Amino acid sequence: MGPLQIKELLQQTPDAQSVTLKGWVRTKRESKNAIFIAVNDGSTIHNIQAVAAPGQFSAELLLSVTTGSCLKITGQLVASQGSGQVVEVKIDDLFVYGTADPDSYPLQPKRHSLEFLREIAHLRPRTNTFSAILRIRHALAFAVHKYYNDRGFFYLHTPIITASDAEGAGEMFRVTTLDLDKLPRTDEGAINFKEDFFGREANLTVSGQLEGELGAMALSKIYTFGPTFRAENSNTTRHLAEFWMIEPEMAFFELEDNMDLAEDFIKTVISYALENCKDDLAFLENRLAEEDKNKPQNERSIPLLEKLNFVVENAFERLTYTEAIDILLKSKPHKEKKFQYPVGWGIDLSSEHERYLVEKHFKKPVILTNYPREIKSFYMKLDDDGKTVRAMDVLFPGIGEIIGGSQREDNYEKLLERVHEVGIDPETIWWYLETRKFGTAPHSGFGLGFERLVLFVTGMGNIRDVIPFPRYPKSAEF
């Protein structure tokens, strides 16, 4: 199964046993008595120190051992003489797989800005920060699958290429094989998509929800976990053009059940990260504390582990949209005109409003329910008042909305009326409407943007730093 990884070597009891070590050089320093090489293979935040005697290897070979070069080292695992590590490797043999010229290798042992690292996304996983983020991202993805598998959900693969717009927002990437230099036209001059690959307009999916609902109406409980795409010209720290979505859909779940699942789900996956990513989270917590030293006291963030434990240990506050608007109208920032956006019943809450409720008023995560129908999607179940829908959004500190969901409209006539209201051609989603004709049932679901979860758990400030190769306006480099 390949050589032992550094994570495993660091856990062994040193007994001068022979070991083979492979990885990339983080630092090399030479003293009168020894040459110290810190090596990392990405399996852990911690480096292992390999030690050679002066004169043991040729000057030419040692010159090729620089930050970024890749080595194979055989030697003996011994107790470390220095502080900071329990074991080290006393080198017997050293082989250089690949060199990294110090004059051109951009990751030298110094602090690099996150903006600079985005420009070298092909190399940034070799830094402590990004290797930690990617290991945590993996742990969270594993925890998601484990959570749903353990609770009897089935993983459903919904299409990446679709003809429907689940959100009705229209900000989609088009998929075509037509020659853009000579597009076929109809007699009316419109593009003739009948000549395209699928014989109709097709797009990259914005959500697996609609197809997920079809699965739930047969298998009872399903979840999707896949890439989604929004052609939204948004350059914020919270938006990507390509991101991953987790979307459970459950037959026979009503709004209350949906809220219970969302809260339990998010607490469970964060708990998994706390338990299984201790070293990486401790590193990221220290990194945040270092950054905060330069900020005024009132702008400093809660220590990362404290924030995560706080979410896991506290019941989320649940209230209606109408109650939230009342709180905002009575709030100091509203009275003193400190909010950038106006407050009133019927508004789509902005991030500043959501964060006020979470961070200032309740000081814990919040689930808002029963939003005005006009600001929510067509598929949400109408409340008895006809004005609001059975929506639920989970709001988190520092992030705002992290989960959006609802009980879905299961009445055929009401759903068809909403489809007409928002201007969707019923013919394009005939299959979705039919599930309300044949054995309809109450059902609910929600969506969690995976990167927002990773952003929260790692404490990073920009969503572009929690996905290996971010896609956003004017950026598809790697």
Image (tube, rainbow, N blue to C red):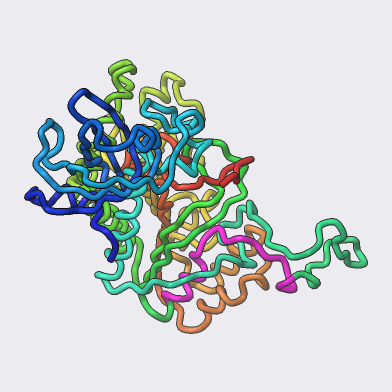
Q: Position of residue 159 (x, y in %)?
A: 54, 69
Quadrant housing residue 246: bottom left
For the point 78% across and 64% down, the residue is 178
Query: Is residue 316 covered in magenta?
Result: no
For the point 23% across and 57% down, the residue is 4
| Viewer can see residue 320 | no
- Split into 4 quadrants, where in the image is the N terminus? bottom left
| Viewer can see residue 185 | yes
Q: Is residue 159 above or below residue 32?
A: below
For the point 26% across and 27% down, the residue is 30
Quick check: 183 left or right of 164? Answer: right
For this orientation, the residue located farthest to the bottom is 438
Q: Position of residue 191 (x, y in %)?
A: 83, 62
For the point 36% across and 23% down, the residue is 332
Q: Position of residue 362 (x, y in %)?
A: 27, 36
Magenta segment:
197-216
Quick check: 112 left or right of 296? Answer: right
Q: Is residue 19 above or below residue 235?
A: below
Quadrant housing residue 384: bottom left
For this orientation, the residue located farthest to the right is 187
Q: Nearer the viewer, residue 219 or 406?
A: 219
